[in-house]
Image (spheres, helix red, strand yellow):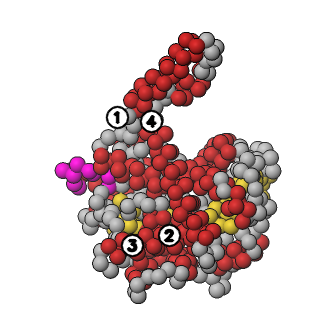
Amino acid sequence: MRAEGETGFRDSVDLMFARAAARLDLAPGLAAKIRVCNATYTVRFGVRLRGEIHTFTGYRSVHSEHMEPVKGGIRFALSVNQDEVEALAALMTYKCALVETPFGGSKGGLCIDPRAWEEHELEQITRRFAYELIKRDLIHPAQNVPAPDMGTGEREMAWIADQYARMNTTDINARACVTGKPPHAGGIQGRVEATGRGVQFALREFFRHPEDAARAGLSGGLEGKRVIVQGLGNVGFHAAKFLSEEDGARIVAVIERDGAVANPAGLDIVALRAWMDAHGGRVEGFAGASFTAEGERMLEAECDILIPAAQEGVIHRGNAGAIRAPLILEAANGPLTFAADEMLRAKGCVIIPDLYANAGGVTVSYFEWVKNLSHIRFGRMQRRAEEARSQILVAELERLSADKGLGWTLSADFKERFLTGSDELALVRSGLDDTMRGAHQAMRALWHAAAGVEDLRMAAYMVAIGRVAQSYRSKGL
């Protein structure tokens, strides 16, 4: 329930946009053109299930067509509504511009509880929803390319791709109509983990710059940092797993629907996820951690990094004043309301904004779309050539050592790693890392140097709006 005086999700996005746009020298009317949503299609369709016809309501919103195709996920949730879909579509526009993927912004949603239906029933519903969008070119490789979002995944994307192929039997690029597909159905390695991996890369890049970390009163790297994650879905799980296993961060608490579990020494994220899978998504009863039913109160616990990775608006006017984390990374879309953002900034909290922090998904979706259009797996042509070139170098080093009597040898571990060419997963991770670094550099250049740019969110919006404006100017606007 929204607190009195609290702005809704779409209004929060618009207010954040306006705060940044006011600092840019835009032609009269251009800011409004960038901000408004171009079109939203609402569909109500029936499917015969369990002996009767059930009617479902779905949406596909196109925010900006400054570049095409437009890009954005499809979510399945009972909370789906037009305002939410339009706000998410707007964020997609700014997100794609910030990380320089050549897409406009779009978003879709179906008002449904996917857990209420059997798999074969959900397939019927998904295919019918896809049919309604495909026949209006709201799913199309060159015009509108969906992806997974909350409540959807590889399975649903495979159904949609197959439905498109059935309706467009001669389209050689049919697989590019949607991203987030399983690898065997035209997907790409690393897509499932992409958003969580992007969160990891975003934090790594933040802590590479001591002056950035100092703004949050932090120092050093990620090693030993206390992290609280809200939402252990796909994004939250992968982010927590990578940060704890690869960077040495301690996940001291996880917040879920039924409450929160905490352990100051750090939670075993893989074990916790396995427990949740076996117990209907509940965290209560997980061994080695204390449990509290008041999960939302854990947002206010002491930590170094807070990662809201669930739904929008979880940090709001009512609880922002009690938040103690000096650094917040928005792994979800819109987890802070506009009022909460203002309150937290006022007390010195640094916020890594959603349009940057969770851009890993659309970045790897871009790679998948390119793969589908090129009709070749990444790494297929160059991997063995890389290995052969590396082998020549290793052989020459070993020959020189033997000829000169140097007595040194290359370790087996080094040789194995050096002589392994880049496969698709390695290339995807490399491209994602490069993207997250580049976007952070663009933001921090304004954050540290431009007068009046108070925070990373304003910087991110300014970069994104500026790039969209350039596209419109090139079209004569």
> What kind of element bears circle 3?
helix
Residue closest to the eye, 152 or 391? 391
Q: Which quadrant of the rendered structure holds the C terminus?
A: bottom left
Q: Nearer the viewer, mark 3 or mark 4?
A: 3
Q: Quadrant of residue 51?
A: bottom left
Which mark is first along the chain, 4 or 1? 1
Residue 117 forms part of the magenta stretch: no
Chain part drawn in magenta? 167-177
Q: Count neighbours of disc 1 (C-alpha within 10 A) and say few if under 14, some if 14 to 19, many if 20 or more.
A: few
Q: Count neighbours of disc 2 (C-alpha within 10 A) and say few if under 14, some if 14 to 19, many if 20 or more.
A: many
Q: Nearer the viewer, mark 1 or mark 3?
A: 3
Is any part of residue 423 visible from this angle?
yes
For marks 1 and 3, give the CA distance: 36 Å
For marks 2 and 4, give the CA distance: 32 Å
For marks 1 and 4, give the CA distance: 10 Å
Residue holding disc 2? 463
Which residue is painted at 55% across and 55% down in the image? 437
Which mark is first along the chain, 4 or 3? 4
Type of amino acid under label 3: Gln
Residue holding disc 4? 423
Residue 57: numbered disc: none
Type of amino acid under label 1: Met
Type of amino acid under label 2: Val
Task: Give the image location of residue 426, x and y in percent.
Answer: 49, 39
Residue holding disc 1? 381
Q: Nearer the viewer, mark 2 or mark 4?
A: 2
For marks 3 and 2, give the CA distance: 11 Å
Q: Quadrant of residue 320?
A: bottom right
Task: Give the image location of residue 221, x and y in percent.
Answer: 71, 50
